[in-house]
Image (cartoon, grey):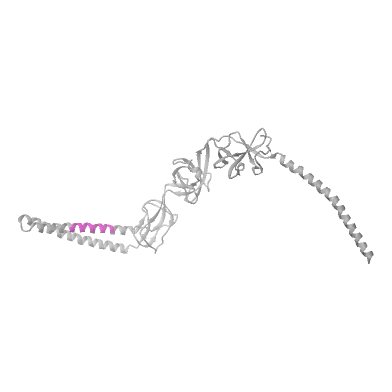
Amino acid sequence: MRPIHDKNRISSINNGKLMVGLLLVILPLTMSLAGCGEPTKASVETAARPVKVAVLTPGSGERTLSFSGVVRPRIESAIGFRVAGKVVERLVNVGDQVALGQTIARLDDTDLKLAEQGATAAVAAARTRRDVAASHLERARRLLPRSYISQAAYDLRQNEFDAAASALDIAESQLRQAANAVAYAVLVADKAGIVTAVNAEPGQVLAVGQPVISLAEAGETEIAIAVPEQDHGRLSVGQRATVKLWTAPSVAADGRIREIAGQADAASRTYAVRVAVGAPPSAMRLGMTASVTIAVEDKPSEMLVPLSALAESDGKSIVFVVDRASKIVRETLVNVDGVAAAGVRIANGLNAGDMVVTAGVQFLRDGMQVQVPAEF
């Protein structure tokens, strides 16, 4: 039994020696690799980082604003009957051209005509009473000088005549109202235009003023656009604009700003602006999408930089400016004054001729050495 234990002990000793030998071989290799890594990291930190740059030039003093809008009529009215009743006929549909004086719809006028007949009878009765009172007054006027009647009796006849005459006036006014109500049972267009919506159908009972159709007045077409806050102050009523249709971009029309809302929309925080089109092209239809471009004066002192040049530090906007001699970037605070088609407008913080980094700003920090393209 003892020789077996000796063999196991010898085997364990040999395995231990083998493990120690392997550790002696691996440990120097690991230390060597670790030593190689430290210079690489240092070299990365000290090497100049390649970047893209741009040299700022002063603004031209003018730029173009572009907005998307919708073709709208200047005046769009909800047309309804001036009396209540049941619709028996509607003669127009959505998209129809309506001429001045054209019949749009009719109501059942049976009750209205009965009311007119009653008013006519009331006028006849009131006229008869007035005539009788006038006859009594004339007789009293002849008898009063002869003292056949008293002054009080004459005054009574005069009062009866005055009351009868006033009653006749009231009856005649009510007759005219009844006649107008019969005429109001026929809805007639008071202006030419296009039907944009239908709100009532035959058989429907309508209240007074309830819309039957919506009518867009012909002849005046506008583009409704929404202008953001930063551009609202650059627009004014009467300013010229160019209008192009999305369906026909090659066709342009001249327009002028007619109206600028005095208050921003509560949801979008934009201002509603109406651009009147003096001579709309034949292809322009209500509801189409249009683009409106407006030339505005810009601040010459403002610099325009690409959006990719803008970064943020501690909640503030920054731009990295490259020193031409040392090729070191400096973190520069800037004030953004809105977004343009070609980039971001900078109100202050930059000057004409400054070289700013336009790509790779997320990898930069203040004082870092950079490598700019050879042409700069």
Q: Is residue 165 magenta?
A: yes
Residue at the top extreme, as displayed: 325
Q: Give residue 155's quadrant in the image.
A: bottom left
Q: Residue 49 placed where, x, y %? A: 69, 40
Q: Is residue 168 magenta?
A: yes
> Which of these two is toward me, 365 or 88?
365
Tell me: 159 left or right of 312: left
Q: Residue 97 placed where, x, y %? A: 42, 53
Q: Residue 369 placed where, x, y %? A: 68, 38
**Vertical arrangement, residue 155 with respect to residue 223, above or below:** below
Tell me: 283 left or right of 104: right
Count how many numbered circles sit on residues in the image.
Answer: 0
Residue at the image position 30 percent from the left and 62 percent from the top: 112
Residue at the image position 76 percent from the left and 43 percent from the top: 40
Quarter of the image that includes the N terminus? bottom right
Range drawn in magenta: 163-177
Residue 129 appears in the picture as rendered: yes
Residue at the image position 52 percent from the left and 40 percent from the top: 64
Tell me: 326 left or right of 60: right
Q: Residue 95 placed where, x, y %? A: 45, 54
> Which of these two is toward me, 354 or 86?
354
Quarter of the image that includes the C terminus? top right
Residue at the bottom extreme, as displayed: 1
Tell me: 244 left or right of 90: right
Residue at the right extreme, as displayed: 3
Q: Give residue 178's quadrant in the image.
A: bottom left
**Vertical arrangement, residue 40 with respect to residue 16, above or below:** above
Secondary structure of the magenta portion, mostly?
helix
